[in-house]
């Protein structure tokens, strides 16, 4: 039986870096956020539901108008909840199909809101990647070409690390002081037992 391990963390904590390291050493990694971005543009049912929920401006040239959607849902918690209720079941279905195709005994699922959506309950263990707030802010500003205000707005919509730490099986500190690979090696050793 496969062990399903969730990898999560707040904005710019470095969860994708951890996922890429795992992938580079041969572990199968499912990138939930990437799959979600594909599905909102390719799944006809999802597209019609999102258009119904968010209005005609949700799509521009047959692609999700990400800026429009982000502005709308990050200003309205109920809308964000409804959006997640549409997208997450579709991503979960893709993950289940992907899992059945993997030969490895351990598979990883990288997802931004693993705890917030209760998806962590479907995992055998979870790794939470954390980093100091200021480090995350500067990474996000650089990566997303966003303003400090936009980044803080998005961060405030996510659960705090403190809340997530209480639910995580492993906490990996990505603060540019503690070597990530060394921490990951210890976690993998425990997972493989």
Image (tube, rainbow, N blue to C red):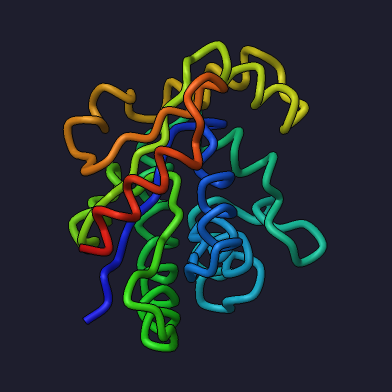
Residue 166 is left or right of residue 28, and the answer is left
Residue 52 seen from this side? no
Left/right of residue 118 with respect to residue 175 in the rendered view: left
Q: What residue appears at the point 53 percent right and 69 percent down from the top-left corner? A: 26
Give the residue displayed 28% in from the left and 49% down from the top.
Answer: 126
Q: In which quarter of the image is residue 91?
A: bottom left
Residue 172 seen in this snapshot: yes
Q: Which residue is drawn at 63% across and 67% down?
A: 38
Using the rendered view, name the quadrant where residue 184 is placed.
top left
Measured as percent of width and height from the top left, residue 159 is found at 33, 29
Does 173 appear above or below 128?
A: above
131 up-or-down from 48: above or below? above
Q: Which of 173 and 40 is in front in this view?
A: 173
Residue at the far right in the pictured view: 61
The quarter in which the C terminus is drawn is: bottom left
Where does residue 111 sit, x and y in percent of width and height? 44, 52
């Amino acid at each position: 039986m496969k062990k399903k391990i969730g990898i999560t963390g707040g904005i710019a904590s470095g969860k994708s870096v951890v996922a890429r390291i795992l992938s580079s050493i041969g572990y199968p990694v499912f990138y939930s956020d990437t799959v979600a971005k594909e599905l909102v543009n390719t799944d006809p049912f999802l597209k019609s539901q999102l258009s119904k929920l968010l209005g005609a401006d949700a799509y521009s040239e047959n692609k999700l108008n990400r800026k429009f959607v982000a502005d709308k849902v990050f200003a309205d918690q109920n809308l964000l909840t409804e959006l997640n209720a549409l997208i997450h079941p579709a991503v979960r279905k893709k993950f289940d199909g992907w899992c059945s195709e993997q030969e490895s005994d351990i598979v990883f699922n990288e997802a931004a809101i693993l705890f917030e959506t209760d998806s962590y309950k479907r995992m055998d263990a979870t790794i939470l990647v954390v980093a100091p707030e200021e480090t995350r802010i500067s990474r996000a500003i650089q990566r997303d070409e966003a303003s400090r205000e936009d980044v803080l707005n998005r961060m405030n919509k996510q659960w705090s690390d403190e809340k997530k730490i209480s639910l995580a099986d492993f906490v990996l500190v990505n603060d540019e002081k503690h070597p990530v690979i060394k921490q990951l090696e210890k976690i993998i050793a425990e997972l493989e037992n």
